[in-house]
Image (tube, rainbow, N blue to C red):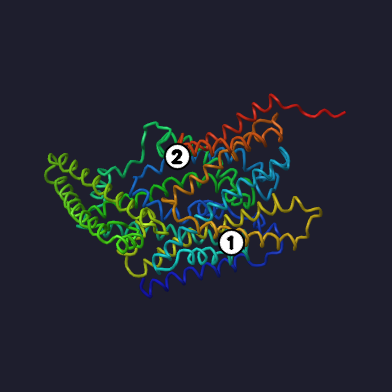
Amino acid sequence: MSGIDWMVLLVTLVGIVLYGIYAGRGQKSNESYLKADSNLPWYVVLLGIMATQASAITFLSAPGQAYTDGMRFVQYYFGLPLAMIVISITFIPIFQRLKVYTAYEFLENRFDRKTRVLTSLLFLFSRGLSTGISIYAPSIILSTMLNWNIYLTNVLTGGILLIYTYIGGAKAVAHTQKLQFLIILGVMAFAGYLLLKNMPNGASFSDSLYLAGKSGKLNVITTNFDWKDKYNIWSGVIGGFFLALSYFGTDQSQVGRYITAKDTSTGRKGLLLNGLVKIPMQFSILLIGALLFAFYALKPAPIYFNERSYQHLKETQPKQAARLEQQHKKLQERFNQQSKEILTERKTNPSALPTAVAAFKNTEKQIANLHGKVEEAINKSNYNAERTDTNYIFLYFVKNTLPVGMIGMLFAVIFLASWGSISAALNSLAACSVKDVHLIFFEEPPSEKQELRLSRLHTLGWGIFSIGVAMFATQMGSLIEAVNILGSLFYGPILGIFLVAFYYKRIPGHVVFFAAILAELSVIGIYNFDIVSFLWLNVVGAAAVIGFSTIGLLFYKPKVLS
């Protein structure tokens, strides 16, 4: 990067840290540190909810996801608006009325303490791991830019945001998220504009969409039903509904955003507006990936977007790399020429299009096969780093195309997006581990100062844990898929516990506790045997808790008081 880019990046990041420290100053109680005094307006709640969900993974990995697999990932969000309605009707009023610090406090009132602790532990384990992945995503950028060790950049990325999260708590998280997300939306919109403006050969927006469509990248809706297909309309609406219901209704990282609202209507407004704007936002981010495919259909693309991994292959297997490069050069030249011919014939000779498109698709398939060979060769070279390149596609475009200043700003955006989700996660992890696990084993309640100090220590502890997880995140492929697969392993059973709590009043805590354990074991078994795609695991987990609870009730004999 240029000196100007470095200045833009550093000024933006330092400014956010200082603003977070300022916004979170004066913490004197856990009510303020963990819940921001429950006094935030609806627009701060909305931006906090969106910033918590839209991590760096969203902006770094989603364009690459669309580039390689098309836009069908957007179907993952189709069940979200309906989930927002259910949560607004059922979940928010209960949480607001009970004035809970965590969602799992409600479970002790409804069931018993062990069910509360179990559910909180499931959340802590899943969210702690996924937060580690969220730290790893922006670490890739520093590692690639500076040629630094990925383990060092993990420490830097996770450590810097800990400063204002540790000091300022929920207030610092909420107010920095507000500023971060507004910057992110503006910069991503401008990046999309620059992508279209810089399209090779003067290709228009219509031309770019045409090429992306002919390559299958605009596959927004796929109606085929297949249990193992990760993204189609059925898994998106049904599986996505259960995942969103669990994530926004029972995951403390999201519950913690709307229980800080000043009242029930404010929390509802923020959540419902999130349901309205999330799909268009995610569609736009994925569209950037589809347009990137059109960009590199008209301009030579690298043989592998993960430049460091490919450089290792060149150094260790020079003859194989040279042979692969020669094949790639011929295919890429042919593909670029065919793309230009398609756009020309689209305007001058439409009757010739079917033949031209068929040749275009055939070359695209050959390039994809060659890419697979490159990835396989890198995997066999015993290279101890990330070996896939899905997460590097958008980054490569930024580094090699955008003007001075804009590069530094886009790198800053990826950090800001990461910090928004990670800081909220650390705050929620601290709230749960303190309130749902640590304090319930205290014989005497601690003072306000002791509890505040304890919450800060837990925030620090979870930050260190998440950085540790990031050290092992190098082999997870598409990060946006990895973090959602991880969530799906736990969200279903957690949601099932809450559904039983809300709607099955006869089922006691002892029954649902063992039902949840059996359900979690079932989900892990189904995933390991690859029986269904990961979105369906959310449905399976929730249904399993309800099913096992119903069966358990048949054998449950309540104690009779003598």
The residue lying toward the viewer, choosing from 447 and 156, is 156
Picture quarter containing residue 387?
Answer: bottom left
Work out which quarter of the rendered image holds the N terminus and state it.
bottom left
Q: Is residue 468 above or below residue 5?
A: above
| Label 2 sits on residue | 78
Count all numbered tags in the image, as a single digit. 2
Neighbour tally class for label 1: few under 14, some 14-19, many 20 plus, Cα within 10 Å: some
Judged left or right of residue 33, residue 367 is left
Neighbour tally class for label 2: few under 14, some 14-19, many 20 plus, Cα within 10 Å: many
Please provide percent x and percent y for residue 533: 45, 37
Please provide percent x and percent y for residue 180: 49, 61
The residue that appears at 69% across and 43% down in the rendered structure is 116
Q: Which mark is residue 26?
A: none
Judged left or right of residue 182, residue 86 is right
Residue sitting farthest toward the right:
562
The residue that appears at 42% across and 55% down in the rendered structure is 59
Judged left or right of residue 278, residue 264 is right
Of discs 2 and 1, which sits in the foreground?
Answer: 1
Do the residues bearing badges 2 and 1 touch, measured as CB atoms within 8 Å?
A: no
| Label 1 sits on residue | 464
Q: In this view, does 244 lie above or below 5?
A: above
User: Does dot 1 land on a helix, a strand or a loop?
Assistant: helix
The residue lying toward the viewer, choosing from 25 and 152, is 152
Q: What residue type is labelled 1?
A: Ile
* Mark sitting earlier along the chain (2/1): 2
User: Does dot 2 land on a helix, a strand or a loop?
Assistant: loop
